[in-house]
Image (cartoon, rainbow, N blue to C red):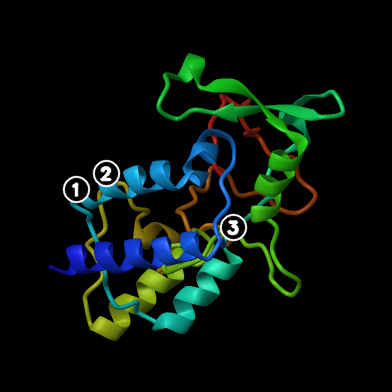
Amino acid sequence: MLSRLFRRLFLESLTAAYQAGRLQFFTDQAALAEPAAFQTFLAALRKVEWVVYAKRAFGGPDAVLGYLSRYTHRTAIANSRLVAFDGERVTFKWKDYRAKAGARYKLMTLDADEFIRRFLIHVLPDGFHRIRHYGLFANANRANNIALARRLLRVPDPAPSSREPDVAKNGRLDQDWNACPCCGGRMIIIETFEPGCQPRLWPLPSIGHDSS
């Protein structure tokens, strides 16, 4: 089976790296530096059935590498999450997604060297750029990409729902009518007024809806 072959090759390479002294262990994994503990750890992994998902990428390996090298949208940690530093240890807030909403935010304290090591894992090399969205369904290009895919596949457009604007009313037939230029979502016209005139319908106060 592919999963067992992958497991064997992976663990053999991991053992070779350990024997060559290329592995370092920190914090909770520091005990694995002992050969006996490391062998016990590997023995447990050999008894577990691994799940290997392998599928050829749409754009090939180069596209995957390009995507992974750019995929980040912020620094490793915001200043607001830093709680304390006593000269040797750093305390910061982190989010535990396995906990309930009220108990997700917790505190962690690490040695300064370990904190810096984890931080530098998220630092991109020179020449790489941070991006937030990537792919076919990214919000910025989703509507245009879906319309283009329908044309290329020669798939008819979906029938408009009863809530869609009346064509006879707005006099437009193209798909981009009332489309938001930023996200591609449908916009609803609540009023049209001439330049220099004051609108009669003012925007309602925010009710906490997140449109990001």
Q: Is residue 131 left or right of residue 147?
A: right
Please name whichever residue, 59 or 15, is drawn nearer the observer in this view of the structure: 15
* Label of residue 145 in the image: none
Regarding residue 150, the answer to whether it shows in the image is: yes
> At label 1, which amino acid type do we have?
Lys
Q: Is residue 204 above or below residue 35?
A: above
* Label of residue 47 in the image: 1
Name the residue rendered at 35%, 56% in the picture: 166
* Closer to viewer: mark 3 or mark 1: 1
Tag 2, which secondary structure? helix
Q: Is residue 101 above or below residue 80?
A: above
Q: Is residue 123 above or below residue 20?
A: above
Please name whichever residue, 183 or 175, is drawn nearer the observer in this view of the structure: 183
**Residue pushed farthest right?**
87
Residue annotated with mark 2: 44
Residue 212: give x, y in percent of width and height: 56, 44
> At label 3, which amino acid type do we have?
Arg
> At label 2, which amino acid type do we have?
Ala
Residue 182: give x, y in percent of width and height: 58, 59
Measured Cα–Cα span from mark 3 to mark 1? 39 Å
Tag 3, which secondary structure? loop
Measured Cα–Cα span from mark 2 to mark 3? 38 Å
Residue 33: give x, y in percent of width and height: 52, 45
Residue annotated with mark 3: 132
